[in-house]
Image (cartoon, rainbow, N blue to C red):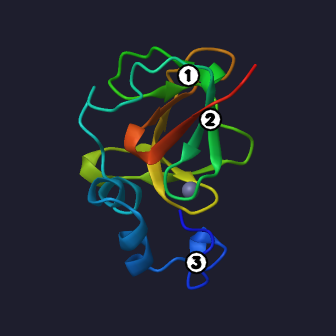
Amino acid sequence: MSESDPAEPADPAELTDEQWRERLTDEEYRILRESGTEARFSGKYVNHKADGIYRCAACNAVLFDAETKYESGCGWPAFYAAEDGAVTTALDTSHGMRRTEVKCASCDSHLGHVFDDGPQPTGKRFCINSVAMAFEETEE
Ligand SMILES: [Zn+2]
């Protein structure tokens, strides 16, 4: 993030592909902008348990509260709820599957997928790439 750079639009949804390539690492670009997926159990947040918030690695918007993170065993960080209005979903039929893609509502970057086999109270499992998020510890 270089918020002071006057060449970049204030709204991350308006960034050009070239600007995204400049601000993201190759791995971040592959996942966030090309709907890639990190290898199972490879992500830095898979077993991460600290209290705090998870922000979008592309635009810094708050996506998930660590309180909703749970042990799903799926190999990616899993949450049973997203912050209000933080994400959007879309049908994803790639790789011969019907899945629901999860995107950042602020910058439209790909985050992961959401499934209906999560725990209560929502029954949802937001399966999110670690690379797509930046954790921020919060004080009690
Ligand atoms: Zn974002």
**Residue 127 seen in this snapshot:** yes
User: Which mark is on residue 140?
Assistant: none
For marks 2 and 3, the one nearer the N-term is 3
- Between 77 and 139, which is closer to the camera in this rendering? 139
Residue drawn at (42%, 67%) of the image? 23
Foreground mark, 3 or 1, reads 3
As displayed, is residue 36 above or below residue 99? below
Foreground mark, 2 or 3, reads 3
As displayed, is residue 110 above or below residue 140? below
Q: Where's residue 11, x and y in %?
A: 65, 72
For marks 1 and 2, the one nearer the N-term is 2
Task: Determine the quadrant in which ligand 1 lies.
Answer: bottom right
**Tag 1: residue type?**
Lys
User: Which mark is on residue 5?
Assistant: 3
Residue drawn at (62%, 42%) of the image? 63
- Between 99 and 30, which is closer to the camera in this rendering? 30
**Tag 3: residue type?**
Asp
Q: CA distance from mark 1 to mark 2?
A: 8 Å
Q: CA distance from mark 3 to mark 1?
A: 34 Å
As displayed, is residue 17 above or below residue 68? below
**Residue 129 seen in this snapshot:** no
Q: Where's residue 108, x and y in %?
A: 54, 62
Q: Are marks 1 and 2 in contact (CB under 8 Å)?
A: yes
